[in-house]
Amino acid sequence: MEVVEVLKKNYLFQGLNEGQLDSVVGLAAVKEFNGGDTIVRQFDRNSDLMLILRGLACIKTFSDETLAEIGEGSIIGEVSLIDDQPRSANVVSVGGTSVAVIPSARLRELMDQDASTKAALMANIARLLAQRLRTANIQLDSALAKGGR
């Protein structure tokens, strides 16, 4: 599947027009990973944004516990656009996985040049983080209710 088609379906790029999407696609390079390959290593300083075009990947802790499985259209590294901190988990390919890599420095340059692109991306990231916080609060509340204090 083409990078632009996957971008159009992804929450992070909602609200961008065709020209803005084309500008983002122009930054992307496609990388292929085999099963078991590490796509992202926990604690790495790399803050590039990644978009899974095809295949699956597992998000794992440093102790190799699987946190989630992600697939086509999933984004890796969106929080790094904001805080530029080291990676918080390992991401490992399950089978063959095709990933579009968007260099964070070049994406930040694009956002600095186009305020409407920046506004749309940052608003979408804010919505995502709010959703994750709500989910974490529900999970914490559930764990505490079960005596997980």
Image (cartoon, grey):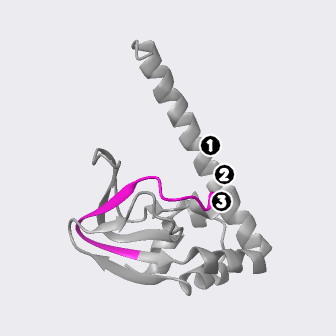
Instruction: Mark 1 and mark 2 in contact? Answer it, CB < 8 Å.
Output: yes
Residue 117 in the image: state x and y as whole percent.
71, 72
- In the image, the segment drawn in magenta is 82-99
Amino acid type indicated by mark 3: Ile
CA–CA distance in space, label 3 to label 1? 14 Å
Check disc 2 and report its element: helix, strand or loop. Answer: helix
**Is 126 situated above or below 15?**
above
Return the residue nearer the eye: 5 or 43. 43
Q: Give the alpha-carbon distance from disc 1 to disc 2, as whole Å.
A: 6 Å
Residue at (62%, 84%) from the top-left corner?
A: 23
Camera-nearest residue between 51 and 8 = 51
Q: Do the residues labelled 3 and 1 touch (CB within 8 Å)?
A: no
Q: Which of 76 and 41 is in front in this view?
A: 41
In percent of width and height, residue 40 lies at: 39, 65
SS at mark 1 in the image: helix
Which callout, 3 or 1, points at the residue further toward the start of the chain? 3
Q: Name the residue under label 2.
A: 126
At which x and y percent is residue 142? Answer: 45, 21
Which residue is labeled 1 in the image?
Answer: 130
Tell us which disc is closer to us: 3 or 1: 3
Total tally of numbered discs in the picture:
3
Q: Which SS class for mark 3?
A: helix
Q: Which residue position holds label 3?
A: 82
- Tell me if residue 83 is in the magenta stretch: yes
